[in-house]
Image (tube, helix red, strand yellow):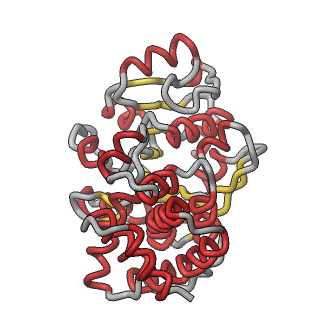
């Protein structure tokens, strides 16, 4: 049965392009939905995405490209969503095809603003998809490094281990190693939270703090993440695993990290609005900071870093004075 499963990628950004590249190594054909019809025409003609990871060349015979989300969903058994969480609801509203019986994987690292739920929970509550048919694809992995074919590691989490293995098998390759996990809630929250810590790392850098402070920030960040995730979903997990700590480190330290870049601009004195306008890509951590802060009003975990980022981004507080206070709260 696993031989003839069909896969679809939803999204036209860098992460969607990287996932399409990985799947094409293992599958004879995939469906790929993106809103931008000009990009579709460009891929058909020139075999690469004009806007993201344009060095990646595709075998056009393997791509069933469409600007109709229903065509992609109707075609596939396994659907991978890789669009910014802020736009997910708008895309799903176009759905007339049923998601019943489909296996839905989220490669989205954020919270759906309309429901304040992580993507897996959103599909479960809004579309009644059982958790056994919901999965998560997380890092530590940058789309840009997949394009360069540098060794990368993915964690595939699903309520049903068999489905996680199928997804892992179809994403694996010479430079992609995969690991499966049953912590679907924890890995997804970790993927969302690490973007906030990456913004914090960027702000610190922009303010002129050095590597010493950054390491203290990351060390506190992983402990803060552990407290938060434990409040949300208690189960046995090792927070030092690559899916949690590894993902946090790559996002906090890498030059490819858009969240770190966004934070860096804020630290250097840009307003939130001007920083967002200057970046062509969405910094998921901006939305995540608000959602995590509001969720934590109920959970009550100790989260000084999340609170600091929230106060800078949403309350207009000065990054310099907020971080000066934060330095006294970290150890």
Q: Can residue 243 be seen?
A: no
Name the residue furthest right: 174
Residue pictured at 40% horizontal, 40% vertical? 278
Indicate the position of residue 301 as horizontal and vertical percent values.
Answer: 38, 87
For the N terminus, the image quarter is: top right
Residue pictured at 38% horizontal, 81% vertical? 232
- Position of 119 with respect to 234 (left or right) is left
Q: Can residue 174 be seen?
A: yes
Compared with 117, 62 (above or below) is: above
- Position of 230 with respect to 23 (left or right) is left
Compared with 195, 27 (above or below) is: above
Compared with 8, 313 (above or below) is: below
For the C terminus, the image quarter is: bottom right
Residue pictured at 73% horizontal, 44% vertical? 173
Indicate the position of residue 47 as horizontal and vertical percent values.
Answer: 58, 18
Residue pictured at 67% horizontal, 44% vertical? 145
Q: Nearer the viewer, residue 74 or 269?
A: 269
Q: Number of labelled discs? A: 0
Quadrant hosting residue 185: bottom left
Q: Nearer the viewer, residue 31 or 247?
A: 247
Indicate the position of residue 258 as horizontal and vertical percent values.
Answer: 50, 49
Quadrant hosting residue 111: bottom left
Compared with 14, 259 (above or below) is: below
Q: Nearer the viewer, residue 220 or 214?
A: 214
């Amino acid at each position: 049965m696993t031989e003839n499963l069909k896969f679809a990628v939803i999204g036209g950004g860098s992460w969607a392009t990287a996932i399409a590249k990985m799947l094409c190594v293992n599958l004879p054909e995939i469906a790929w939905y993106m809103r931008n019809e000009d990009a579709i025409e460009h891929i058909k003609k020139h075999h690469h995405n004009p806007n993201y990871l344009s060095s990646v060349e595709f075998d056009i015979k393997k791509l069933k490209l469409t600007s109709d989300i229903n065509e992609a969903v109707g075609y596939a058994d396994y659907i991978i969503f890789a669009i910014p969480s802020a736009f997910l609801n708008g895309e799903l509203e176009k759905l007339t095809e049923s998601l019943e019986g489909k296996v839905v994987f989220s490669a989205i690292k954020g919270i759906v603003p309309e429901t304040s739920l992580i993507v897996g929970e959103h599909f479960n509550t809004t579309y009644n998809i059982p958790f056994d048919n919901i999965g998560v694809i997380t890092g530590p992995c940058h789309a840009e490094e997949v394009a360069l074919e540098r060794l990368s590691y993915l964690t595939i989490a699903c309520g049903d281990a068999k489905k996680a293995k199928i997804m892992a098998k179809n994403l694996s390759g010479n430079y992609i190693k995969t690991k499966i996990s049953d912590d679907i809630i924890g890995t997804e929250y970790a993927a969302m939270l690490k973007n906030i810590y990456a913004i914090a790392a960027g702000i610190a850098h922009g303010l002129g703090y050095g590597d010493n402070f950054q390491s203290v920030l990351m060390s506190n960040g992983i402990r803060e993440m552990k407290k938060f995730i434990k409040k949300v979903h208690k189960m046995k997990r090792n927070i030092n695993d690559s899916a949690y700590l590894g993902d946090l480190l790559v996002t906090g330290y890498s030059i490819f990290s858009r969240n770190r870049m966004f934070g860096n601009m804020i630290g250097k004195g840009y307003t939130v609005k001007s920083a967002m306008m200057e970046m062509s890509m969405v910094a998921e951590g901006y939305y995540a900071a608000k959602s995590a802060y509001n969720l934590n009003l109920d959970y009550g975990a100790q989260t000084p870093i999340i609170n600091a980022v929230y106060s800078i981004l949403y309350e207009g507080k000065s990054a310099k004075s907020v971080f000066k206070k934060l330095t006294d709260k970290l150890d």
